[in-house]
Amino acid sequence: MHSDLLTPLFSTAEMCAVLSDDSRLRAMLAFEAALARAEAATAIVPADAATSITAACENFEPDIAALAEATRRSGNPAIPFVKALTTHCPEPGKGWVHWGATSQDAIDTAASLVGRDAVAVLDAQIKALGAGLARQAEAHRATVMPGRTLLQPALPVTFGFKLAGWLDMLTRCRASLQSAADQALVLQFGGAVGTLAAIGDEGGEVRAALGRELDLPVPDIAWHTLRDRVARLGSELAILTGALAKMAGDVALLMQAEVGEAAEPAGPGRGGSSTMPQKRNPVAAAAVRANATKAAGLAASLIAAMPQEHERGAGGWHAEWTILPELFELASGALAHMHETVSGIDVRDDRMRENLDIGNGTLMSEALMMALAPEMGRLEAHHIVEAAAKQAIAEDIPLRAICLETHQIVDALGADGIDEALDPSRYLGIAEMTVDKVVSRWSAQED
């Protein structure tokens, strides 16, 4: 539901324009004009009638308020739309408008045309976000920070490695969304029950010509109540939005004052509190997570709408009309927020380094254990390091100092070996190589 007050927070002006009532009606006009031309090309409709219909579609200005009122009575917008277009169309086209088609043909095909534009908007946004993530991942390839499991400090990673994880997920989402769009955004043309009986034996030829006119793929059979296409596309939109919410959630957690390792871009009036002057709240992260929460329910609604009755659904199809556009809007809004966040993210590498010492350096306990294990066996090393870590925490003493006082550790590693084992930058595994691989994969699909 559009709101002048709230929609700018959760979507984008570009996507709202693509999905507007005007765009929807223009797409329906494109369907009617293309249908007339396709039927003229197959000698179903007189050529002069097709010319007349095409001209009428080009200069018709629908009265949206009147169509809305008539839609409430008729049950779908195509019925009053076709009546209004027929009234507007001069002879010889008047009697040939919408020939052999049904309301759902016009509505579903228009949705495919609008959806094609909407997917193009999203893909441009995904590319922009992906480019930003790739740049930041490379810039912070070696920026060491605590990795966290179950919200607790675990082992060192790099900020670039975290960003590469986001980019890898975005790469998959882009490919999956495009695949779903390729399947979903197709021609709908079957007439009353999908058989094109009103056109006769030439139905298949007209359908192919109509697909060429609109540059839409032509399915083998009408899909009036076969709604897996729509459900799959909607699900991918929700998955994309959920992926963005994972990124947003990480940013919100890193922004916590107790963590303070990264933050959304600052700006006048951004993230303030109406009562607490010191607050700097996450703005984009909250909006993205809200969008994902809503998108998950909307995708479920599309799946719930799939069991549509016989050859025309009674309610399930109608539910899709507002659900799918809203999923596009939510995904677009989430992408815009995350692009802004990633492009201007405030990375505090000094705080990341400080937080590596939380627990008096015990974050490096596994590294120390693995350094000792070849000398005394893993189990014995685990017992010794566990005791040292507990002492460091209980007595608030750096783990390094405990190690230098523990003869088994000193005998096995020496002071230099202890320092090497406790150095977070030396215990990153394949983190930096992974960044390179993920960024390279993203870049390869852009070439």
Image (cartoon, grey):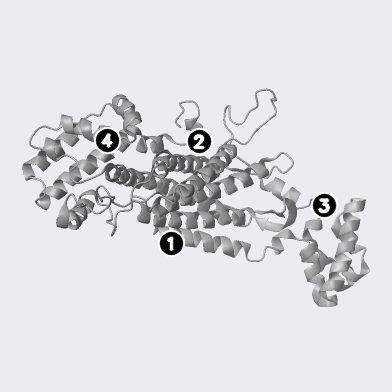
Q: Quadrant of the C terminus?
A: bottom left
Residue 174 x %, y %? 45, 54
Dot 2 surroundings within 10 Å: few (below 14), some, or many (20 or more)?
Answer: some
Q: Which of label 3 and label 2 is nearer to you?
A: 2
Q: Secondary structure at mark 2?
A: helix
Give the spatial CA distance, label 2 vs label 1. Answer: 31 Å
Residue 386 x %, y %? 86, 63
User: Is residue 298 shown to the viewer in this render?
Assistant: yes
User: Is tag 3's residue or tag 2's residue first in the polypeptide sequence?
Assistant: 2
User: Is tag 4's residue or tag 3's residue first in the polypeptide sequence?
Assistant: 4
Determine which quarter of the picture holds residue 56. top left
Circle 3 sits on which residue?
Answer: 359
Q: Which of label 1 and label 4 is nearer to you?
A: 4
Circle 1 sits on which residue?
Answer: 444
User: Is tag 2's residue or tag 1's residue first in the polypeptide sequence?
Assistant: 2
* Label 2 close to label 1 by CB (< 8 Å): no
**For the residue marked with disc 1, what is the amino acid?**
Ala
Instruction: Please tell me which residue is depicted at 31% across the width and 52% down the height of the picture.
Output: 186
Name the one closer to the observer, 311 or 360.
311
Circle 4 sits on which residue?
Answer: 79
- 143 to the left or right of 64: right
Instruction: Please tell me which residue is depicted at 49% across the width and 58% down the height of the picture.
Output: 172
Instruction: Please tell me which residue is depicted at 83% across the width and 76% down the height of the picture.
Output: 377
Name the one closer to the observer, 331 or 414.
331
Give the spatial CA distance, label 3 vs label 1. Answer: 42 Å
**For the residue marked with disc 3, what is the amino acid?**
Gly
